[in-house]
Amino acid sequence: MQTKEIIKLKDITVSFDGEPVLSGLDLNISDGEFVTLLGPSGCGKTTTLRIIGGFVTPDSGSVFFDGQDIADLPPYKRQVNTIFQRYALFPHLNVEDNVAFGMRVQKKKPAEIKETVDRMLKLVNLAGFNKRKVETLSGGQQQRVAIARALANNPRVLLLDEPLAALDLKLRKDMQVELKNIQKSLGITFIYVTHDQEEALSMSDTVVVMDAGRIQQIGTPQDIYNEPENAFVADFIGESNILDGIMHEDYLVEFFGRKFKCLDAGFGPKEPVDVVIRPEDIDIVPADKGHLTGKVTAVTFKGVHFETIVDFKGFKWMIQTTDYYPVDSVIGIVLNPEDIHIMKKSEYSGMFGDYSSYSEEFDEMANPEIDLTEEAEVQE
Amino acid sequence: MKTLSRIYNALIFLFLYAPIFVLIVFSFNDSKSRVVWSGFSLRWYEELFQDEEILSALGVTLSIAVIATIVSTIIGTMAAIGFRSVNARLRRVLMALNNFPMVNPEIVTGISLMLLFVFIHRTTGLLQPGYMALLLSHITFCIPYVVLQVLPRLRQTNPHMYEAAMDLGCRPLSAFFKVMLPDIFPGVLTGALMAFTMSLDDFVISLFTSGASAQNLSVTIYAMVKRRVTPEINALSTLMFGAVLILLVAINVLQMKSTPKQAKK
Ligand SMILES: Nc1ncnc2c1ncn2[C@@H]1O[C@H](COP(=O)(O)OP(=O)(O)O)[C@@H](O)[C@H]1O
Ligand SMILES: [Mg+2]
């Protein structure tokens, strides 16, 4: 992969109606990368994307494209194209005219336009749909037209704002693979926005985790999952048990009144830390053989595994296990050094990682779904 | 019960439409009488189109209606777009300001416009009652109707469409004409027809703002009736009734055409 920097956001600050939306955002994006902005609804992902697209002017900070400051460049002069959250196809034009729109604005030759339209429609698996009206297409097909329309302009960078959010699960999975293939075959930069961590992990070269208008962590999907930087990231990406601990020395951490070996170093003496233990890393053993013992309080069958909630001295952990341990059974657990990840304390410490209030319903409600408000507005 | 309500309905329509019906029938009467039918004829229509006073009033009415429609459609559409981009609180205030003139008694609007024009005339020497004042007042009272027709259409459009056009290389103005206008066009057209109808239809406000130099049809008819009621007036009223009827039917058809589409989405 090339490492040339194509987009650089420097110390970006934005507020709407006095409410800070982005605070001191720094982001560098390499050419040809698949970068995902991941975070809960309202954290400022769309705003970040719109700054790159030229639709939002930051209150302060600078935006560089290919080394040039483009703060004052309007959207129609940027070598960037956008897939909007609701496709935003032009309903009075047919598929072909939608895809040709950008090239016609640039006064390209008809023969070239025709050739590009056909090539783009083939790329998104819509060959032969040229004359169809866009409103006769399904959601997935409309999405493909939007992709073809943006790519027909030959952008250096494609911005995608939750492009798959409105599609059903099966179609979404297929489109994820397809989008990734398109990005690889064209070799252009994709900046992809989603609140779906699974989507982010499976598609991206680089994931940018955001919350409350700040970047929490930037890294490869593996980094983000295995080495979360704070309690927010650990909780948002996958499931995590997060405990208070004290770092005694390098590679030795204490929690629940017991010292454990770990792989982390570089903390101050007796520094309080957050300890992350992933539910799937925990080994269950008979009670008398465990480092810790606890009592099962709830079990949910999830297909691949059982989600078992275990009470350790009043603190509830989630453990994913393929074996079934009924409620009220007493179990022991073993933690190996590689199962333990240590994070510095942050403003998020103590907010996440305890499964005491955990229940199925809560899980569903907490799922930040596609903006229902927006849906309502369209139907208004 | 059912027959009773039918009779009630029939009576309502009878009282509503009988006068117009009589007027239409007698516009084709061969004699001057307004009571006795003496045979079919088009003589009043012929005379109508030879009457200088009426023809010049017709010219004023039509030219005012056309210009007022164009100008108020442009201003009203821009206003509607502006309304969309402000926050909800301010939008409610603006909508109330927009709707108020439509429920405000016309005579109040008429008198206040007259006073305004008189004031401007006194202080600057411009805008004495006449063609320009008439035109400006027609533009003024047409705008709210355009806004009211364009807004719901705007609400249906995807707000990102305009940005998508710019994203694909359009300058703001060309993005508006290429993408936004085609999408809201049914609303704009209905608004324009509504404005045209309102302008043709208006009497009260015109009475107060037209001077002796420029009188439109309704004001002219009023002046003529004060002198004498000729069957010519019947003919003229029939034509105006027909024109407004056709326009209203057209507006309704247009509105119906754009509604099922919305249901499909
Ligand atoms: N045009 C706007 N006017 C006012 N507030 C806005 C505007 N756009 C976004 N916001 C606010 O900024 C915050 C971040 O929004 P957004 O960037 O859309 O978040 P995300 O895409 O991560 O869900 C939200 O609280 C949202 O309400
Ligand atoms: Mg968003």
Image (cartoon, coloured by chain):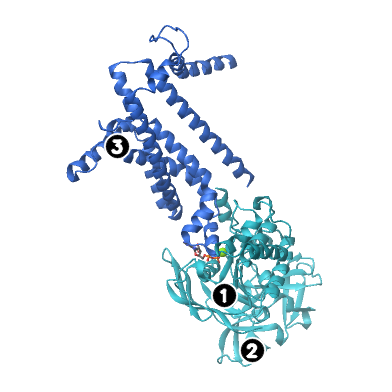
| Three-letter amino acid code of the residue under disc 1 | Gly
> How busy is the neighbourhood of tag 3: few (under 14 within 10 Å), some, or many (20 plus)?
many
Q: CA distance from mark 3 to mark 2?
A: 87 Å
Q: In the rendered image, is residue B246 in sight?
A: yes
Residue at the far right: name it. Answer: A323
Chain designation of label 2: A
Quickly name the residue at label 3. Answer: B131
Can you tell which quarter of the image residue A365 is in? bottom right
In primary-sequence order, the first of circles 2 and 1 is: 2
Kindly report which numbered mark, 3 or 1, lies closer to the viewer in this rendering. Answer: 3
- Nearer-the-camera pick, A85 or A365: A85
Tell me the shade of chain B: blue
Chain at tag 1: A
Which residue carries the number 1 mark?
Answer: A350
Q: Residue at x 23, y 38 (%)?
A: B128
Q: Residues within 10 Å of mark 1 (few under 14, many from 20)?
A: some
Q: How many marks?
A: 3
Which chain letter matches label 3? Answer: B
In the displayed structure, A27 sits above or below B72; it is below
Residue to which mark 2 is pinned: A264
The residues tagged by marks 3 and 1 sit, at their Cα atoms, a distance apart of 76 Å
Q: Position of residue A268 (x, y in %)?
A: 55, 91
Q: Amino acid at mark 3?
A: Tyr
Type of amino acid under label 2 = Asp
> Considering the numbered disc 3 on the image, is that residue within a helix, a strand or a loop?
helix
* Figure check: B108 above or below B78: above
Q: Are marks 2 and 1 in contact (CB under 8 Å)?
A: no
Q: Within 8 Å of ligand 1, the CB of disc 3?
A: no
